[in-house]
Image (cartoon, rainbow, N blue to C red):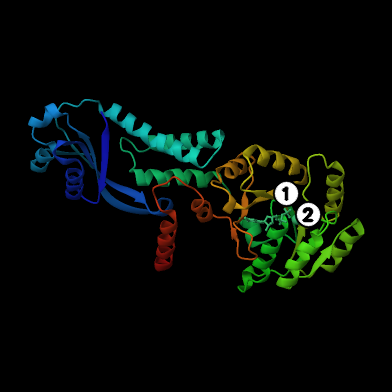
Amino acid sequence: MKYITIVEKDFESAVKKARDTYGHTIRIHSRRDVLSRGGFLWMKKKPHVELICYLADAADEKNPSIIEKIEKDEIIESDNQKQTVEEPQMETEGEQMHSIRETLLEHALNILEENQFSEVVSKTVLSLLKEELKDCQGGYPSSEEFELMIVDKIVSLISIDHETQIHPPHFFVLLGPTGTGKTTTIAKIGALWSLQTAEEFHHSVKFVTLDTFRVGAYEQLASFADSLEIEIDLVKSEEDMYRIIEQTSNTDVVLIDTIGKSPKDKELTVKMKTLLSVIPADQKKLYIAISGSMKQEDIVKSIDMYAGFGITSIVITKVDETQSIGNILSVAYEKNLPLLFITDGQKVPSDIHKASAATMLSLLHGFSLDFESLWANQSNLLVDEG
Ligand SMILES: Nc1nc2c(ncn2[C@@H]2O[C@H](COP(=O)(O)OP(=O)(O)O)[C@@H](O)[C@H]2O)c(=O)[nH]1
Ligand SMILES: [Mg+2]
Protein backbone atom coordinates (compact mmCIF):
# COMPACT_ATOMS: atom_id res chain seq x y z
CA MET A 1 0.00 0.00 0.00
CA LYS A 2 1.24 3.47 -0.83
CA TYR A 3 1.15 5.99 2.00
CA ILE A 4 0.82 9.73 1.62
CA THR A 5 2.20 12.12 4.21
CA ILE A 6 0.39 15.42 4.64
CA VAL A 7 2.05 18.07 6.70
CA GLU A 8 0.15 21.16 7.80
CA LYS A 9 0.29 23.65 10.62
CA ASP A 10 -2.75 22.09 12.38
CA PHE A 11 -5.06 19.08 12.19
CA GLU A 12 -7.98 20.89 10.49
CA SER A 13 -5.79 22.24 7.69
CA ALA A 14 -4.26 18.77 7.19
CA VAL A 15 -7.70 17.11 6.91
CA LYS A 16 -8.88 19.81 4.50
CA LYS A 17 -5.79 19.39 2.36
CA ALA A 18 -6.21 15.60 2.34
CA ARG A 19 -9.84 15.90 1.25
CA ASP A 20 -9.25 18.65 -1.30
CA THR A 21 -6.40 16.74 -2.88
CA TYR A 22 -7.58 13.12 -2.75
CA GLY A 23 -11.38 13.28 -2.24
CA HIS A 24 -13.42 10.99 -0.01
CA THR A 25 -11.48 7.81 -0.67
CA ILE A 26 -8.65 9.14 1.47
CA ARG A 27 -8.14 7.31 4.77
CA ILE A 28 -6.05 8.45 7.69
CA HIS A 29 -3.69 5.87 9.03
CA SER A 30 -2.23 7.95 11.81
CA ARG A 31 -1.66 11.42 13.12
CA ARG A 32 1.41 12.89 14.73
CA ASP A 33 1.88 16.25 16.43
CA VAL A 34 5.45 17.33 16.02
CA LEU A 35 7.63 20.06 17.38
CA SER A 36 10.20 19.92 14.67
CA ARG A 37 13.46 21.57 14.01
CA GLY A 38 13.53 23.58 10.81
CA GLY A 39 14.91 26.76 9.35
CA PHE A 40 18.39 26.95 8.00
CA LEU A 41 20.40 23.96 9.17
CA TRP A 42 18.02 22.95 11.92
CA MET A 43 18.09 26.11 13.96
CA LYS A 44 14.43 26.96 14.67
CA LYS A 45 11.55 25.01 16.16
CA LYS A 46 7.98 24.99 14.90
CA PRO A 47 4.94 22.80 15.63
CA HIS A 48 3.02 20.99 12.88
CA VAL A 49 0.73 18.05 12.33
CA GLU A 50 1.55 15.11 10.10
CA LEU A 51 -1.18 12.85 8.77
CA ILE A 52 -0.21 9.53 7.23
CA CYS A 53 -2.97 8.70 4.75
CA TYR A 54 -3.72 6.10 2.12
CA LEU A 55 -6.30 5.72 -0.60
CA ALA A 56 -9.06 3.20 0.12
CA ASP A 57 -9.91 0.54 -2.47
CA ALA A 58 -13.15 1.00 -4.36
CA ALA A 59 -14.61 -1.93 -2.34
CA ASP A 60 -13.97 0.08 0.79
CA GLU A 61 -16.07 2.97 -0.41
CA LYS A 62 -19.15 1.91 1.51
CA ASN A 63 -17.29 2.43 4.77
CA PRO A 64 -17.46 5.94 6.17
CA SER A 65 -14.35 7.97 5.58
CA ILE A 66 -11.84 7.59 8.36
CA ILE A 67 -11.48 11.31 8.37
CA GLU A 68 -15.14 11.61 9.33
CA LYS A 69 -14.69 9.14 12.17
CA ILE A 70 -11.61 10.85 13.47
CA GLU A 71 -13.26 14.20 13.51
CA LYS A 72 -15.85 12.80 15.92
CA ASP A 73 -13.71 10.93 18.39
CA GLU A 74 -11.04 8.36 18.99
CA ILE A 75 -7.84 10.33 19.22
CA ILE A 76 -5.68 8.43 21.60
CA GLU A 77 -2.91 10.30 23.31
CA SER A 78 0.24 8.60 24.43
CA ASP A 79 3.75 9.90 25.06
CA ASN A 80 2.94 13.28 23.56
CA GLN A 81 1.96 11.57 20.34
CA LYS A 82 -1.64 11.53 19.19
CA GLN A 83 -2.52 8.57 17.05
CA THR A 84 -5.80 7.47 15.56
CA VAL A 85 -6.61 3.80 15.70
CA GLU A 86 -8.91 2.79 12.90
CA GLU A 87 -9.71 -0.11 10.61
CA PRO A 88 -7.63 -3.24 10.44
CA GLN A 89 -4.22 -2.18 9.21
CA MET A 90 -2.88 -3.62 5.97
CA GLU A 91 0.70 -3.22 7.11
CA THR A 92 2.16 -3.17 10.55
CA GLU A 93 3.48 0.11 11.83
CA GLY A 94 6.98 -1.29 11.53
CA GLU A 95 6.46 -2.09 7.86
CA GLN A 96 5.00 1.32 7.21
CA MET A 97 7.93 3.07 8.91
CA HIS A 98 10.27 0.93 6.90
CA SER A 99 8.72 1.96 3.60
CA ILE A 100 8.73 5.67 4.52
CA ARG A 101 12.37 5.38 5.59
CA GLU A 102 13.22 3.71 2.27
CA THR A 103 11.43 6.47 0.33
CA LEU A 104 13.36 9.17 2.20
CA LEU A 105 16.70 7.42 1.69
CA GLU A 106 15.94 6.91 -2.00
CA HIS A 107 15.28 10.66 -2.30
CA ALA A 108 18.66 11.32 -0.65
CA LEU A 109 20.39 8.93 -3.03
CA ASN A 110 18.79 10.64 -6.05
CA ILE A 111 20.02 14.03 -4.84
CA LEU A 112 23.54 12.69 -4.23
CA GLU A 113 23.61 11.13 -7.70
CA GLU A 114 22.23 14.24 -9.41
CA ASN A 115 25.04 16.27 -7.85
CA GLN A 116 27.61 13.64 -8.88
CA PHE A 117 28.88 12.87 -5.41
CA SER A 118 31.27 9.92 -5.26
CA GLU A 119 30.27 6.51 -3.98
CA VAL A 120 32.32 7.08 -0.82
CA VAL A 121 30.57 10.37 0.00
CA SER A 122 27.13 9.00 -0.94
CA LYS A 123 27.61 6.01 1.36
CA THR A 124 28.85 8.23 4.19
CA VAL A 125 25.94 10.66 3.87
CA LEU A 126 23.41 7.80 3.68
CA SER A 127 24.82 6.10 6.76
CA LEU A 128 24.75 9.40 8.70
CA LEU A 129 21.12 9.87 7.62
CA LYS A 130 20.23 6.31 8.67
CA GLU A 131 21.75 6.97 12.09
CA GLU A 132 19.74 10.15 12.50
CA LEU A 133 16.52 8.45 11.36
CA LYS A 134 17.12 5.83 14.06
CA ASP A 135 17.18 8.63 16.62
CA CYS A 136 13.77 9.85 15.43
CA GLN A 137 12.24 7.21 17.76
CA GLY A 138 9.20 6.05 15.87
CA GLY A 139 8.65 9.31 14.02
CA TYR A 140 10.27 10.50 10.85
CA PRO A 141 10.96 13.94 9.41
CA SER A 142 8.79 15.69 6.84
CA SER A 143 10.31 15.84 3.36
CA GLU A 144 11.34 19.47 4.02
CA GLU A 145 13.10 18.52 7.23
CA PHE A 146 14.71 15.54 5.58
CA GLU A 147 16.18 17.73 2.80
CA LEU A 148 17.69 19.93 5.51
CA MET A 149 19.12 16.81 7.10
CA ILE A 150 20.73 15.85 3.77
CA VAL A 151 22.25 19.32 3.39
CA ASP A 152 23.40 19.26 7.00
CA LYS A 153 25.24 15.97 6.41
CA ILE A 154 26.87 17.12 3.14
CA VAL A 155 27.99 20.43 4.65
CA SER A 156 29.33 18.65 7.75
CA LEU A 157 31.71 16.58 5.59
CA ILE A 158 33.34 19.57 3.88
CA SER A 159 35.58 21.94 5.75
CA ILE A 160 36.24 25.57 4.91
CA ASP A 161 39.68 27.18 5.13
CA HIS A 162 38.55 30.07 7.37
CA GLU A 163 42.11 30.57 8.59
CA THR A 164 43.37 31.67 5.13
CA GLN A 165 40.18 33.64 4.46
CA ILE A 166 40.80 35.74 7.55
CA HIS A 167 44.58 35.53 8.03
CA PRO A 168 46.28 34.93 4.67
CA PRO A 169 49.92 33.80 4.75
CA HIS A 170 52.72 36.19 3.79
CA PHE A 171 53.38 34.12 0.63
CA PHE A 172 50.26 32.73 -1.05
CA VAL A 173 51.20 30.27 -3.82
CA LEU A 174 48.56 29.07 -6.29
CA LEU A 175 49.32 25.79 -8.08
CA GLY A 176 47.23 23.78 -10.52
CA PRO A 177 46.89 22.47 -14.06
CA THR A 178 47.26 24.82 -17.04
CA GLY A 179 44.11 26.68 -18.02
CA THR A 180 42.24 26.18 -14.73
CA GLY A 181 42.22 29.94 -14.12
CA LYS A 182 45.20 30.42 -11.79
CA THR A 183 46.35 33.78 -13.20
CA THR A 184 42.79 35.15 -13.33
CA THR A 185 42.14 33.91 -9.78
CA ILE A 186 45.36 35.52 -8.47
CA ALA A 187 44.11 38.82 -9.91
CA LYS A 188 40.66 38.35 -8.31
CA ILE A 189 42.16 37.51 -4.89
CA GLY A 190 44.52 40.49 -5.14
CA ALA A 191 41.55 42.76 -5.79
CA LEU A 192 39.45 41.14 -3.05
CA TRP A 193 42.05 41.80 -0.38
CA SER A 194 43.58 45.07 -1.54
CA LEU A 195 40.31 46.84 -2.44
CA GLN A 196 38.63 45.81 0.81
CA THR A 197 37.70 48.95 2.76
CA ALA A 198 37.00 47.31 6.14
CA GLU A 199 40.31 47.56 7.94
CA GLU A 200 40.25 44.07 9.48
CA PHE A 201 39.85 42.44 6.03
CA HIS A 202 42.16 44.73 4.06
CA HIS A 203 45.60 43.40 3.11
CA SER A 204 48.27 45.10 1.02
CA VAL A 205 49.25 42.76 -1.83
CA LYS A 206 51.89 42.27 -4.47
CA PHE A 207 51.89 39.91 -7.47
CA VAL A 208 54.78 37.63 -8.34
CA THR A 209 54.85 35.20 -11.23
CA LEU A 210 57.01 32.12 -11.65
CA ASP A 211 55.47 31.59 -15.08
CA THR A 212 58.42 32.77 -17.15
CA PHE A 213 58.24 29.92 -19.63
CA ARG A 214 55.08 30.67 -21.59
CA VAL A 215 54.94 33.56 -24.03
CA GLY A 216 52.61 36.27 -22.74
CA ALA A 217 52.22 34.78 -19.24
CA TYR A 218 53.89 37.73 -17.50
CA GLU A 219 51.97 40.24 -19.64
CA GLN A 220 48.65 38.61 -18.69
CA LEU A 221 49.21 39.15 -14.96
CA ALA A 222 50.87 42.52 -15.59
CA SER A 223 47.77 43.83 -17.31
CA PHE A 224 45.62 42.86 -14.29
CA ALA A 225 48.26 44.42 -12.00
CA ASP A 226 48.12 47.62 -14.02
CA SER A 227 44.35 48.01 -13.86
CA LEU A 228 44.23 47.10 -10.13
CA GLU A 229 47.25 49.28 -9.32
CA ILE A 230 49.09 46.36 -7.73
CA GLU A 231 52.88 45.94 -8.03
CA ILE A 232 54.18 42.93 -9.93
CA ASP A 233 57.52 41.12 -10.05
CA LEU A 234 59.04 38.19 -11.88
CA VAL A 235 61.03 35.30 -10.38
CA LYS A 236 63.41 33.40 -12.64
CA SER A 237 66.06 32.32 -10.15
CA GLU A 238 66.66 31.66 -6.48
CA GLU A 239 68.40 35.06 -6.24
CA ASP A 240 65.20 36.72 -7.50
CA MET A 241 63.26 34.94 -4.79
CA TYR A 242 65.67 36.06 -2.02
CA ARG A 243 65.34 39.64 -3.31
CA ILE A 244 61.53 39.45 -3.26
CA ILE A 245 61.53 38.10 0.32
CA GLU A 246 63.65 41.06 1.39
CA GLN A 247 61.68 43.66 -0.54
CA THR A 248 58.23 42.53 0.58
CA SER A 249 58.67 42.56 4.34
CA ASN A 250 56.14 45.41 4.56
CA THR A 251 53.63 43.81 2.18
CA ASP A 252 50.89 41.76 3.85
CA VAL A 253 50.42 39.15 1.11
CA VAL A 254 52.60 38.21 -1.86
CA LEU A 255 50.39 36.34 -4.33
CA ILE A 256 52.49 33.92 -6.38
CA ASP A 257 51.22 32.74 -9.76
CA THR A 258 52.77 29.52 -11.06
CA ILE A 259 52.94 27.61 -14.29
CA GLY A 260 50.70 24.61 -14.84
CA LYS A 261 52.57 21.43 -15.53
CA SER A 262 51.90 18.14 -17.17
CA PRO A 263 52.78 14.88 -15.40
CA LYS A 264 55.77 14.53 -17.77
CA ASP A 265 57.23 17.91 -16.83
CA LYS A 266 59.62 16.60 -14.18
CA GLU A 267 62.20 19.32 -14.85
CA LEU A 268 59.66 22.10 -14.38
CA THR A 269 58.42 20.58 -11.14
CA VAL A 270 61.93 20.46 -9.73
CA LYS A 271 62.55 24.07 -10.80
CA MET A 272 59.34 25.33 -9.16
CA LYS A 273 60.00 23.36 -5.99
CA THR A 274 63.52 24.78 -5.79
CA LEU A 275 62.29 28.37 -6.18
CA LEU A 276 59.50 27.91 -3.63
CA SER A 277 61.80 26.19 -1.13
CA VAL A 278 63.69 29.49 -0.77
CA ILE A 279 60.66 30.90 1.11
CA PRO A 280 60.75 29.90 4.82
CA ALA A 281 58.08 27.27 5.57
CA ASP A 282 56.34 29.40 8.22
CA GLN A 283 55.82 32.26 5.75
CA LYS A 284 54.16 30.39 2.89
CA LYS A 285 51.11 28.29 2.17
CA LEU A 286 50.29 26.50 -1.07
CA TYR A 287 46.86 26.16 -2.65
CA ILE A 288 45.52 24.29 -5.66
CA ALA A 289 43.13 25.62 -8.33
CA ILE A 290 40.76 22.95 -9.66
CA SER A 291 38.28 23.64 -12.42
CA GLY A 292 34.65 22.68 -11.77
CA SER A 293 34.41 21.17 -15.23
CA MET A 294 37.16 18.57 -14.57
CA LYS A 295 36.22 14.90 -14.28
CA GLN A 296 36.60 13.36 -10.84
CA GLU A 297 39.49 11.11 -11.87
CA ASP A 298 41.38 14.10 -13.32
CA ILE A 299 40.82 16.10 -10.13
CA VAL A 300 42.28 13.23 -8.10
CA LYS A 301 45.28 12.97 -10.49
CA SER A 302 45.97 16.73 -10.25
CA ILE A 303 45.80 16.76 -6.46
CA ASP A 304 48.07 13.70 -6.27
CA MET A 305 50.50 15.38 -8.66
CA TYR A 306 50.84 18.40 -6.34
CA ALA A 307 50.65 16.43 -3.09
CA GLY A 308 54.44 16.67 -2.67
CA PHE A 309 54.17 20.48 -2.42
CA GLY A 310 51.95 20.31 0.69
CA ILE A 311 48.56 21.71 -0.27
CA THR A 312 46.59 23.72 2.32
CA SER A 313 43.22 24.04 0.55
CA ILE A 314 41.34 24.14 -2.76
CA VAL A 315 40.15 27.02 -4.94
CA ILE A 316 37.32 25.78 -7.17
CA THR A 317 37.28 27.66 -10.49
CA LYS A 318 34.78 27.86 -13.36
CA VAL A 319 31.73 26.60 -11.45
CA ASP A 320 29.74 28.59 -14.05
CA GLU A 321 30.84 26.00 -16.61
CA THR A 322 29.62 22.93 -14.73
CA GLN A 323 26.28 21.39 -13.76
CA SER A 324 27.38 20.03 -10.41
CA ILE A 325 30.17 20.37 -7.90
CA GLY A 326 29.63 17.04 -6.12
CA ASN A 327 32.72 15.66 -7.86
CA ILE A 328 35.04 18.31 -6.36
CA LEU A 329 33.34 18.26 -2.96
CA SER A 330 33.82 14.48 -2.90
CA VAL A 331 37.53 14.74 -3.65
CA ALA A 332 37.87 17.51 -1.04
CA TYR A 333 36.32 15.16 1.53
CA GLU A 334 38.29 12.09 0.46
CA LYS A 335 41.62 13.98 0.37
CA ASN A 336 40.79 15.86 3.56
CA LEU A 337 41.29 19.28 1.94
CA PRO A 338 39.21 22.33 2.90
CA LEU A 339 37.74 24.81 0.39
CA LEU A 340 38.99 28.38 0.16
CA PHE A 341 37.40 30.28 -2.77
CA ILE A 342 34.93 29.56 -5.55
CA THR A 343 35.10 31.42 -8.88
CA ASP A 344 32.22 31.61 -11.31
CA GLY A 345 33.19 33.71 -14.31
CA GLN A 346 35.92 35.55 -16.19
CA LYS A 347 35.27 38.97 -14.67
CA VAL A 348 37.96 40.43 -12.42
CA PRO A 349 37.36 41.20 -9.61
CA SER A 350 33.66 40.32 -9.24
CA ASP A 351 33.51 36.57 -10.03
CA ILE A 352 35.04 35.18 -6.84
CA HIS A 353 33.40 34.17 -3.55
CA LYS A 354 34.70 32.94 -0.24
CA ALA A 355 33.80 29.27 0.15
CA SER A 356 31.05 28.82 2.76
CA ALA A 357 28.06 26.60 3.53
CA ALA A 358 25.88 29.15 1.70
CA THR A 359 27.98 29.18 -1.50
CA MET A 360 28.04 25.36 -1.46
CA LEU A 361 24.25 25.18 -1.05
CA SER A 362 23.63 27.59 -3.90
CA LEU A 363 25.52 25.16 -6.18
CA LEU A 364 23.65 21.98 -5.18
CA HIS A 365 20.65 20.80 -7.20
CA GLY A 366 17.66 18.48 -6.92
CA PHE A 367 16.16 19.85 -3.71
CA SER A 368 12.58 21.06 -3.55
CA LEU A 369 13.68 23.64 -0.96
CA ASP A 370 14.77 27.02 -2.22
CA PHE A 371 18.09 27.50 -0.46
CA GLU A 372 18.69 30.99 -1.74
CA SER A 373 15.58 32.41 -0.06
CA LEU A 374 16.13 30.16 2.98
CA TRP A 375 19.57 31.67 3.35
CA ALA A 376 18.21 35.20 2.81
CA ASN A 377 15.49 34.62 5.45
CA GLN A 378 17.99 33.22 7.89
CA SER A 379 20.30 36.18 7.36
CA ASN A 380 17.38 38.52 8.05
CA LEU A 381 16.53 36.57 11.19
CA LEU A 382 20.09 36.77 12.39
CA VAL A 383 20.09 40.49 11.79
CA ASP A 384 16.69 40.96 13.49
CA GLU A 385 17.58 38.81 16.45
CA GLY A 386 21.15 39.98 16.69
N1 LIG B 1 34.03 30.70 -17.20
C1 LIG B 1 35.09 30.95 -16.42
N2 LIG B 1 36.28 31.20 -17.01
C2 LIG B 1 37.35 31.45 -16.21
C3 LIG B 1 37.25 31.48 -14.80
N3 LIG B 1 38.48 31.75 -14.30
C4 LIG B 1 39.31 31.89 -15.37
N4 LIG B 1 38.64 31.71 -16.52
C5 LIG B 1 39.13 31.76 -17.91
O1 LIG B 1 39.92 30.60 -18.14
C6 LIG B 1 40.97 30.89 -19.07
C7 LIG B 1 42.30 30.46 -18.48
O2 LIG B 1 42.55 31.28 -17.34
P1 LIG B 1 44.02 31.54 -16.79
O3 LIG B 1 43.86 32.41 -15.59
O4 LIG B 1 44.93 32.04 -17.86
O5 LIG B 1 44.42 30.06 -16.38
P2 LIG B 1 45.86 29.48 -15.91
O6 LIG B 1 46.48 28.87 -17.11
O7 LIG B 1 45.56 28.47 -14.87
O8 LIG B 1 46.63 30.64 -15.38
C8 LIG B 1 40.87 32.38 -19.34
O9 LIG B 1 40.15 32.58 -20.54
C9 LIG B 1 40.06 32.92 -18.16
O10 LIG B 1 39.33 34.10 -18.47
C10 LIG B 1 35.96 31.22 -14.21
O11 LIG B 1 35.76 31.20 -12.97
N5 LIG B 1 34.92 30.96 -15.07
MG1 LIG C 1 48.52 31.37 -15.86
Query: Toward the viewer: 368 or 129?
Result: 368
Q: Amino acid at mark 2?
A: Thr
SS category of the residue bearing label 2: loop
Can the viewer see residue 265? yes
Query: Toward the viewer: 189 or 312?
Result: 189
271 left or right of 107 in image: right
Can the viewer see residue 252? no
Q: Is mark 1 within 8 Å of ligand 1?
A: yes
SS category of the residue bearing label 1: loop
Badge 2: few (under 14), some or many (20 or more) residues near its Cα, within 10 Å? many
Q: Earlier in the sequence, mark 1 or mark 2?
A: 1
Q: Give the residue pinned by disc 2.
A: 258
State the mark number for residue 176. 1
The percent coordinates of residue 34 (x first, y second) are 28, 46
Q: Is mark 2 within 8 Å of ligand 2?
A: yes
353 left or right of 72 in image: right
Q: Amino acid at mark 1?
A: Gly
Q: Indicate the quadrant of ligand 2 in the picture.
A: bottom right
16 left or right of 132 in image: left
- The N terminus - image quarter: top left
> Residues under labels 1 and 2: Cα distance?
8 Å
The percent coordinates of residue 373 (x first, y second) are 41, 59
Q: Residue at x 27, y 40 (%)?
A: 5
Do callouts 1 and 2 mark residues in contact (Cβ within 8 Å)?
A: yes
Q: Tell me which corner region of the image, top left, top right, bottom left or bottom right, holds residue 103.
A: top left
Q: Is residue 94 above or below residue 112?
A: above
Query: Toward the viewer: 258 or 140?
Result: 258
The percent coordinates of residue 329 (x first, y second) are 58, 44
